[in-house]
């Protein structure tokens, strides 16, 4: 049986996982009576809740006499490290583009990486059944994108299909029969080359995905570049410089069949497999036979652009909700994450019992924090900050720059331009995008976007769509204004009382409701003015036996503003922390004692 390895790459929400569902269904990977959930490859709880793909996954389908290994990749820019690794395992790529939204930042990113590796992508204009679809214009946009990214003549001559992943059809023309995906299967077999392999050389593969299995331990997935893998064969692991990491034995060999991983006795070059039996090997090291001389080349990953401080939770409520609260447990968990996720970098912080975690963006680090809190960890998280560098030629300090594409209703375009202008953003392009919407393209420092997304949704009444992509480095653009409002800070320990909160809501927006535990230094809400204000949330009504005229007036509370984890992380300032536990997300001041806060302010002003 012949082989094809292909990755499905696209911007977030353009339909990759839904298309894979239909490919599996129509190739006979499922029984007729088998119940399969939508987006079957999104097995992770967080992926199902958020509706996005976070981890790259492999599935396999059989079409005729050919087995096709499909790799579903994340679409969000923060998880671009997954896409970069995966492209090393495949010989072709399906580029999905939404027929209405067209080319967006992550589309540029993944297509650029695919073209740089010499792949000849197949373009699928998906969701052509949408009411606002504009497939012909999108086709032109894709061609312009390929040309702008320096595609050669063979790559510019890309085949294209029109499809609806949800309805399960793909055709070469818009007026095709719209029956099934056979046109896509046939095109993959014709256009994607079979893997070029050396069957006689010693076994070697580059680890691209690291997972933990409760029964098998560490599982490493990659494509066999040469030779054959056999069960129980001896192995050695090489770093890029040729040094040996460890030696071991291949205790379990798994190949992909449909959605399942199936045990096998051997597998040949070109196939994508998962192996177990190694204790230290990680991404992107080379795993091979003992007589392998040199490591296989591995693609370097773009550097992280954002860092946060993860520290132990030292607040008054620490240890009441989580089971893993020590710095040693946090350290071990973070370093285990860094082994499998090469886009994350861990280092010890200047603060005691704290760690610097650097990644691609707030969402990527937010997903890591959310995963850890579900595992029982308690953490205190500092404000995100960008990682600067010094230009080796000019000696100038440079900061990460992002390209931001905003689709917004025309009445709200002005406020978006104004707000991003205040955050040092430069408007690059402004044009109508159909349906009464305007497309704005900005070039803006990464730190200018920290905390902006919630404000953006408020300004556009929830109708705006913002996409961003790392676009290089730019000279430091100076001070960017932060949050304009101060905080309402608790000056007492206890449980918040309805009576006290009723009078506090006049002072600003509350983040908590009655009955919630509070402590000195905890942030209860946002002050309506610029300064911080200390308040008492546990003050109760003084009861007497004398009836007052207003005794029976209803004391109605406005519902508190509940923040998601990402919103809380983006909201805090440098002197504040987010306390994350399995049961709650709280905001607090870094220094809980008011006297310590004043001393810290004086030190900052003196510096």
Image (cartoon, rainbow, N blue to C red):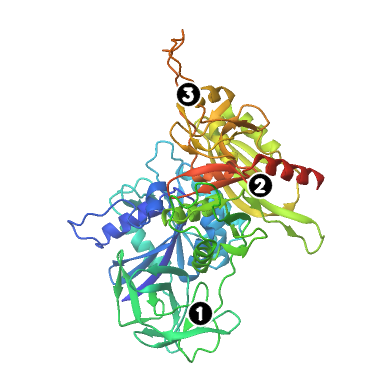
Give SS at disc 2.
helix
For residue 422, what is the image quadrant? top right
Question: Which marked residue is nearer to the observer: mark 1 or mark 2?
Answer: 2
Q: Name the side, left or right, on which 217 lies relative to 503.
A: left
Numbered tag placed on residue 499 in the rendering: 3
**Of residues 434 and 86, which is closer to you in this image?**
86
Q: CA distance from mark 2 to mark 3?
A: 40 Å
| As drawn, 461 above or below 136 | above
Q: Earlier in the sequence, mark 2 or mark 3?
A: 2
What residue did someone put label 1 on?
Answer: 286
Mark yes or no: residue 143 visible. no
- Residue contact between numbered discs 1 and 3, judged by CB atoms under 8 Å: no
Give SS at disc 1.
strand
Location of the N terminus (image quadrant): bottom left
What residue did someone put label 2 on?
Answer: 447
Q: CA distance from mark 1 to mark 2?
A: 36 Å
Residue appearing at x 44%, y 53% in the figure: 322
Q: Position of residue 338 (x, y in %)?
A: 53, 66
């Amino acid at each position: 049986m012949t082989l094809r390895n292909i990755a499905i790459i696209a911007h977030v929400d353009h339909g990759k996982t839904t298309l894979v569902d239909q490919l599996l269904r129509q190739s006979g990977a499922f029984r007729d009576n088998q119940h399969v959930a939508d987006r079957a490859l999104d097995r992770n709880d967080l992926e199902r809740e958020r509706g996005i793909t976070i981890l790259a996954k492999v599935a396999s389908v059989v079409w005729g006499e050919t087995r096709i290994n499909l790799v579903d990749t994340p679409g969000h820019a923060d998880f671009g490290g997954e896409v970069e690794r995966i492209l090393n395992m495949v010989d072709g790529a399906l580029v999905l583009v939404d027929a209405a939204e067209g080319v967006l930042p992550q589309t540029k990113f993944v297509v650029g990486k695919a073209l740089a590796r010499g792949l000849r992508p197949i373009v699928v204009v998906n969701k052509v059944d949408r009411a606002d679809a504009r497939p012909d214009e999108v086709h032109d946009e894709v061609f312009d994108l390929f040309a702008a990214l320096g595609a050669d003549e063979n790559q510019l001559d890309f085949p294209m299909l029109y499809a609806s992943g949800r309805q399960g059809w793909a055709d070469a023309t818009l007026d095709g029969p719209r029956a099934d995906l056979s046109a896509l299967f046939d095109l993959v077999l014709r256009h994607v080359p079979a893997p070029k392999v050396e069957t006689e050389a010693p076994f070697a593969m580059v680890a691209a995905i690291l997972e933990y299995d409760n029964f098998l331990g560490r599982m490493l997935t990659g494509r066999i570049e040469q030779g054959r893998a056999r069960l129980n064969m001896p192995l050695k692991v090489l770093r890029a410089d040729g040094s040996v990491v460890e030696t071991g034995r291949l205790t379990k060999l798994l190949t992909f069949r449909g959605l399942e991983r199936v045990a096998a006795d051997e597998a040949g070059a070109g196939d994508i497999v998962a192996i177990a039996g190694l204790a230290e090997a990680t991404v992107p090291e080379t795993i091979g036979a003992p007589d392998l001389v040199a490591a296989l080349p591995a693609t370097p990953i773009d550097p992280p652009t954002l860092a946060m401080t993860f520290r132990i939770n030292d607040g008054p409520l620490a240890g009441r909700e989580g089971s893993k609260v020590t710095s040693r447990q946090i350290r071990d968990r973070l370093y285990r994450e860094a082994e499998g996720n090469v886009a994350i970098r861990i280092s010890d912080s200047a603060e005691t019992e704290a760690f610097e975690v650097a990644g691609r963006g707030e969402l990527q680090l937010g997903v890591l924090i959310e995963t850890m809190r579900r595992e029982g960890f308690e953490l205190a998280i500092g404000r995100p900050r960008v990682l600067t560098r010094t230009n080796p030629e000019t000696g100038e300090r440079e900061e990460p720059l992002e390209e931001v594409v905003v689709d917004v209703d025309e009445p709200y375009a002005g406020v978006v331009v104004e707000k991003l202008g205040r955050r040092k953003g430069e408007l690059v392009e402004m044009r109508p995008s159909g349906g009464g919407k305007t497309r704005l393209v900005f070039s803006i420092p990464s730190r200018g976007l920290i905390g902006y997304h919630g404000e953006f949704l408020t300004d556009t009444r929830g109708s705006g769509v913002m996409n961003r992509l790392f676009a290089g480095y730019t000279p430091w653009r100076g001070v960017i204004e932060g949050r304009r409002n101060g905080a309402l800070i608790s000056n007492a320990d206890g449980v918040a009382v309805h009576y006290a909160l009723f009078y506090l809501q006049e002072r600003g927006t509350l983040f908590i409701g009655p009955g919630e535990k509070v402590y000195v230094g905890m942030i209860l809400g946002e002050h309506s003015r610029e300064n911080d204000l200390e308040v008492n949330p546990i003050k109760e009504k003084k009861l007497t036996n004398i009836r007052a005229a207003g005794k029976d007036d209803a004391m109605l509370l406005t519902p508190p503003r509940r923040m998601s984890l990402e919103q809380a992380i983006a909201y805090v300032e440098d002197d504040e922390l987010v306390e994350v536990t399995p049961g709650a997300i709280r905001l607090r001041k870094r220094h809980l004692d008011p006297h310590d806060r004043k001393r810290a302010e004086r030190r900052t002003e003196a510096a």
